[in-house]
Image: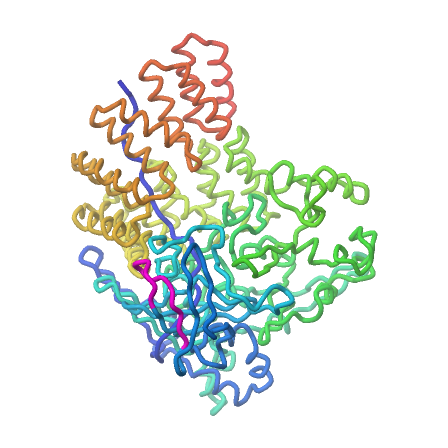
């Protein structure tokens, strides 16, 4: 008989996707989102307000009347061309009956009268004609948006390469050339993950309001300007116009809510001995807070952000976790600069975006090396002794060593903004890329390390990537390494915050005390990281860590903390804490309702209702998530667990078997199905699913542990030890695998192995 805890492995979900662009008609700047629900009775004004009469958007055309130089520079910028109505002047692709074939489907691009069309596979996989509504972007590629029912715009996955033909451009190509994306896939252009309203809208238009209605499943998305205009960065300008007309008006900052003058107020002095400029003025990173609203990998939790809004009051940014980043913080997937730049010495020194990028044209302030030379003397750094390459060669360029590039969307080259020193020695340990081997592909990391050591001494400090690697891979000393990193004030806040998200796997008395200090921290990113990971902390410890976060200024942090505490009884807390929890939980509900066009938020709403005892509503939200995204595993798993609680085990089994049909990464479904079968005393059937989940590429230490325990429970202790030992290779510090190895070796009389694993466990 299999003897294991058969509770289902449940999921709590946080969206971690970028939100980008927008469409519609002019709207008022007063935005009130209806977030009412029968349970939470949420009615929250989510607008950014500075007075009883908030400023309104007036349009870039009015700005241009006085700011002609800036307007001229902006006109040809990527911001101005971010999104436009489809027309002869905006469309760059070949619509002269050109064709493109992908996975057996031939799409045709053509024009009827003044309207541009594509004939391609629709939601049923059959060829249909679709009018092009808007262009999206301009260089090095241009996408096209198509309007479909429900107020939705969808981004076509066949895009036009706008580069010169000599550079491989002037052609159609598919964004997923090596994948068989068919009409049933979420990445198909008609799928949920190509939906413009959520995925991209608010970073391609000014004052975009998504306006999704859960009851009707319809978007009424609106904007003030179709592209990124002046007020996207400077804020609504109505008060500024009032000030221009009557300068006696007592508006600070010329009627704007933000000063974007960090470049003018900085005071940089050159240290000629070191060859590096230093800023004598403490930089206020208002500009970065504004740019980060779009140039970051983040989820919008609360709408209504404007220039000057606090970033963490509206957005939940991704930290440095794989696969978005390599474990040492280098970019891997599309992460849009913010997370990289926060790691950099440039950011720490007070550099801001417009030091390097002219903010209206968006062009660099000089040649690539010329930009660097603003603060780094060429007499010191543009020398062979420094870059180790022939002068004027590709290897001598600053960016090729300190800002290595990576292609996204097949042809879009983007540079890492963490401005790091190449570390081939770390690449050998952490399996991360480095600039040296990216160019010298025929060489090894060891070769590059030796070459660097001939000219430069070995780094004196341990790189933070080593601690993050230890935490991710459950190394024996992970807890101490992560703790040291969190308390090292010389390390970037986003790095320390990432370490905070890993520490809950290694809780001891010392690490709990450390997390208590994090809960009281003045560093917003550390507080956010603890809130993001609070649901992985045992329930008995959660209040001590979560209650202080309820009182954070940043709305995203306190709403996440409130949700993590939602399943716990709060009757014994003082009324001030209870009231704060209720208010923060309302904010959390509002954020999930705002994003309820996504399956992740529907599952989160299901969990929230489940915690409050609203079982019917919880089931309805889970089912809606499955209907919207049949590929989404957490919806099946959490609904199956709800059925378990109700004693509906057959329903749970049937649901999970359906999930196996639609979900691509099946390990979590297989594991949950195995547990369901154990609860039905169908042990031999369960064993096959435990085996599949433990051996899957997307396995988890818990799945391996359960399979090992199941094998041992059926008398296969040698095979159990083999599975668990292999699992320990994958998860070297896993406490549950180690405990199982201690227990099974003790049962088998293997005292030496028992002592070995007991020693490892005690060291941990």
Q: Is residue 124 magenta?
A: yes
Relative image position of residue 18 (x, y in whole percent): 44, 59
Q: Quadrant of residue 213?
A: bottom left
Residue toward you, 34 or 405: 405
In the picture, measured across the screen, residue 159 lies left or right of residue 710, that is right
Q: Is residue 757 visible?
A: yes
Q: Is residue 296 above or below residue 738?
A: below
- Choose between 110 and 415: the one closer to the eye: 110
* Relative horizontal placement of residue 677, taking residue 332 as reference (left or right): left
752 or 323, nearer to the observer: 323
* Residue 21 image point, x, y percent: 43, 68
Q: Residue at x 49, y 22 (%)?
A: 762
State whether residue 164 is above or below residue 612.
Answer: below
Q: As drawn, is 387 to the left or to the right of 119?
A: right
Report if residue 551 lies within the magenta region. Answer: no
Q: Is residue 318 left or right of residue 484?
A: left
The percent position of residue 483, horizontal first and vertical second, equals 53, 38
Q: Residue at x 50, y 61 (%)?
A: 173
Question: Please, which residue is most extreme toward the top here?
Answer: 749
Q: Nearer the viewer, residue 2 or 517?
A: 2
- The spot of residue 738 in percent (x, y) is 45, 23
Residue at the bottom extreme? 245
Q: Which residues are magenta?
A: 116-128
| Position of the N terminus by quadrant | top left
* Count of numbered marks: 0
The residue shown at (55%, 38%) is 469
Magenta region, mostly helix, strand or loop?
strand
In the picture, residue 363 is in which quadrant? bottom right
Confirm whether residue 33 shows in the render. no
């Amino acid at each position: 008989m299999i003897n294991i805890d058969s509770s289902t492995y449940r999921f709590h979900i946080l969206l971690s996707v970028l939100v980008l662009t927008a469409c519609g008609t002019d709207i008022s700047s007063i935005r009130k989102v209806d977030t009412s629900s029968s349970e939470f009775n949420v009615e929250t004004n989510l607008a950014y307000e500075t007075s009883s009469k908030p400023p309104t958007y007036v349009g870039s055309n009015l700005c241009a009347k006085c700011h002609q130089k800036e307007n001229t520079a902006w006109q040809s910028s990527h911001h101005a061309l971010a999104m436009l109505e489809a027309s002869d002047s905006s469309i760059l692709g070949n619509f002269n009956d050109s064709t493109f074939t992908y996975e057996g489907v031939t799409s045709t691009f053509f024009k009827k009268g003044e309207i541009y069309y594509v004939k391609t596979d629709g939601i049923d996989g059959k060829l249909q004609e679709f009018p092009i509504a808007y262009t999206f972007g301009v260089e090095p590629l241009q996408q096209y948006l198509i309007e479909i029912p429900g107020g939705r715009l969808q981004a076509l996955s066949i895009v036009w390469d706008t580069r010169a033909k000599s550079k491989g451009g002037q052609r159609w190509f598919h964004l997923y050339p090596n994948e068989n994306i068919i009409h049933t896939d979420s990445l198909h252009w008609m799928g949920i993950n190509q939906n413009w309203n959520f995925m991209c809208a608010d970073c391609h238009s000014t004052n975009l309001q998504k306006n999704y209605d859960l009851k009707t499943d319809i978007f009424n998305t609106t904007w003030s300007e179709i592209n990124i205009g002046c007020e996207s960065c400077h804020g609504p300008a109505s008060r500024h116009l009032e000030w221009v007309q009557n300068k006696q008006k007592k508006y600070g900052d010329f009627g704007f809510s933000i000063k974007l003058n960090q470049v003018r107020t900085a005071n940089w002095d050159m240290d000629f001995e070191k060859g590096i400029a230093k800023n004598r003025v403490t930089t206020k990173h208002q500009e970065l807070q504004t740019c980060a609203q779009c140039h970051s990998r983040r989820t919008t939790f609360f709408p209504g952000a404007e220039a000057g809004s606090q970033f963490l009051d509206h957005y939940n940014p991704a930290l440095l976790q794989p696969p978005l980043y390599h474990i040492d913080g280098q970019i891997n997937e599309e992460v849009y600069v913010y997370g990289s730049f926060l790691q950099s010495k440039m950011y720490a020194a007070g550099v801001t975006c417009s030091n390097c990028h002219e903010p209206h044209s968006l062009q660099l302030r000089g040649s690539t090396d010329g930009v660097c030379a603003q603060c780094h003397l060429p007499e010191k750094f543009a020398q062979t002794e420094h870059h180790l390459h022939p002068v004027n060669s590709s290897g001598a360029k600053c960016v090729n060593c300190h800002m290595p590039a990576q292609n996204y969307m097949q042809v879009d080259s983007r540079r890492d903004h963490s401005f790091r020193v190449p570390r081939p020695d770390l690449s050998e340990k952490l399996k991360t890329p480095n600039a040296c081997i990216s160019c010298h592909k025929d060489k090894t990391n060891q070769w590059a390390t030796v070459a660097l050591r001939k000219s430069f001494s070995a780094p004196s400090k341990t790189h933070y990537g080593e601690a993050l690697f230890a935490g991710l891979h459950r190394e024996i000393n992970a807890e101490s390494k992560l703790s040291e990193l969190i308390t090292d004030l010389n390390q970037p806040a986003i790095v320390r915050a990432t370490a905070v998200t890993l520490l809950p796997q290694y809780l001891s008395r010392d690490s709990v005390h450390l997390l208590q200090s994090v809960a009281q921290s003045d560093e917003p990113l550390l507080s956010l990281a603890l809130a993001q990971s609070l649901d992985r902390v045992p329930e008995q410890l959660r209040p001590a860590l979560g209650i202080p976060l309820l009182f954070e200024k940043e709305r995203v942090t306190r709403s996440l903390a409130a949700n993590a505490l939602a399943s716990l009884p709060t009757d014994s807390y003082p009324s001030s804490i209870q009231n704060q929890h209720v208010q923060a939980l309302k904010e959390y509900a509002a954020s999930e309702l705002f994003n309820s066009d996504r399956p992740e938020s529907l599952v989160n709403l299901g969990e929230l209702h489940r915690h409050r005892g609203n079982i019917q509503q919880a089931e309805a939200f889970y089912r809606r998530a499955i209907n919207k995204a049949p590929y989404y595993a957490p919806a099946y798993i959490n609904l199956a667990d709800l059925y378990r609680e109700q004693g509906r085990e057959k329903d749970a089994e049937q649901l999970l078997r359906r999930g196996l049909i639609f979900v691509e990464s099946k390990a979590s479904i297989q594991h949950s199905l195995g547990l369901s079968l154990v609860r039905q005393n169908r042990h031999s059937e369960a064993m096959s699913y435990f085996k599949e989940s433990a051996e899957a590429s997307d396995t988890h230490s818990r799945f391996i542990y359960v399979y090992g325990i199941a094998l041992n429970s059926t008398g296969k202790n040698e095979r159990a030890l083999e599975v668990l030992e292999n699992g320990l290779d994958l998860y070297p510090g896993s406490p549950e695998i180690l405990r199982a190895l201690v227990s099974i070796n003790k049962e088998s009389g293997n005292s030496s192995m028992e002592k070995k694993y007991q020693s490892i466990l005690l060291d941990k």
